Amino acid sequence: MKNKFLLALICITMLAVTACSESSREMNPALESKTGTYVVEDFGKTIPVSIEKENDHINVGFIYSAQLYTIKLNESNKEFIALLEEAVNKESTIHIYLRNNSNEIVKVEKLSDEESRAFRTSLMENQTIREKRNTYFKNVIENEGKLRSLFIKIKNNSCNGLHPSSPCANFNYGVDGCYARAHKIKQLLEENGYSSEKQWVYGNLRARTLDGKGCISWGYHVAVLVTYINNYNKKVKAVVDPSLFPNKLVSIREWENACMNRSCGYVHVTSRATTPSWIYYRSLDGRIKTMDIHYNKTNCTLSKLRGYSGTQRAPADLASCNRLL
């Protein structure tokens, strides 16, 4: 009887250990590779919007994110790459898994048509809404003095400014979130009675961090574009982007050049666009445009990026901000 009790106790213990092991694997899924087992991070559902080969890997851009993600060009990834290419062409939703703490794609799953439509709706539903232009907004800033005062106000309202807004734009962190920083600047300008535009550039982009110690890679970058009257009484357009130029406004050409810093690696521009400022996100070909009329996505993104700096990897759950809140 005693032996039977001990045998049962051993079996229960083994079952508990197995269950715990299975539970651990579910919380920290792993994949086998030629170099061994590694932990996989669930990036979640997303829509890929660009794909481009570079040396021994492919760069992939996902909706909203300015960061580029990579997948190695090898036989084991052949099926995953085909799924990515199909999703870019069809603007369909897929499920992405990354190597833990990196931007390397290690697994791609196709979703059903129903799942894909449901996810797309969660991102795009408010696209049917049109933001009404407020006739009280001025299209042109009347002089350089007013332009400087607005720029100072933008800086003072940033996370490192004298009067940070809540949430605030973190101009010391450029890895991701340019779309939210630009929308915050757009909001501040409108609160002061001025409208603006947005300037977009797409490609294999690279820039220096503000401290000059690191490099950032982007699939696209966006910033606010304003029109003002200069000291020679001429209308001039200038880009407002304190994440690249913390102390001044610059021309579109100077801004683009900063997005193509060749000291950080290979760069090229695929396309560029100027849009109304109410467009929150625009894909490479312009087929996908979204809005954030009530600033829910903007505020969520800025809140998650506060405290980040340099080349820190953006939080894994940043994409959750861009679903309907």
Image (cartoon, rainbow, N blue to C red):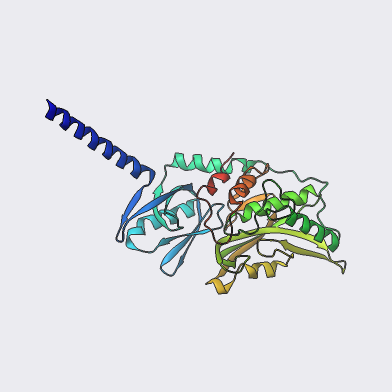
Q: Which residue does the image show at 63% across and 65% down from the upper left? A: 210
| Quarter occupied by residue 263 | bottom right
**In screen coordinates, is 155 left or right of 320?**
right
Residue 293 placed where, x, y %? 68, 43
Residue 163 placed where, x, y %? 74, 51
- 243 is higher (above) or lower (below) than 164: below
- 283 is higher (above) or lower (below) than 129: below
Q: Is residue 267 visible?
A: yes
Residue 247 placed where, x, y %? 73, 65
The residue most toward the front is 2
Q: Which residue does the image show at 20% across and 31% down from the upper left? A: 9
The residue most toward the bottom is 263
Quarter of the image for the C terminus: give it: top right
**In screen coordinates, is 269 left or right of 70?**
right
- 268 is higher (above) or lower (below) than 135: below
| Quarter occupied by residue 34 | bottom left
The residue most toward the top is 1
Report how many numbered discs are placed on residues in the image.
0
Quarter of the image for the N terminus: give it: top left
Q: Which residue does the image show at 79% across and 45% down from the upper left? A: 134
Q: Is residue 291 visible?
A: no
Residue 286 placed where, x, y %? 60, 55
Q: Viewer-proximal residue, 221 or 188?
A: 188
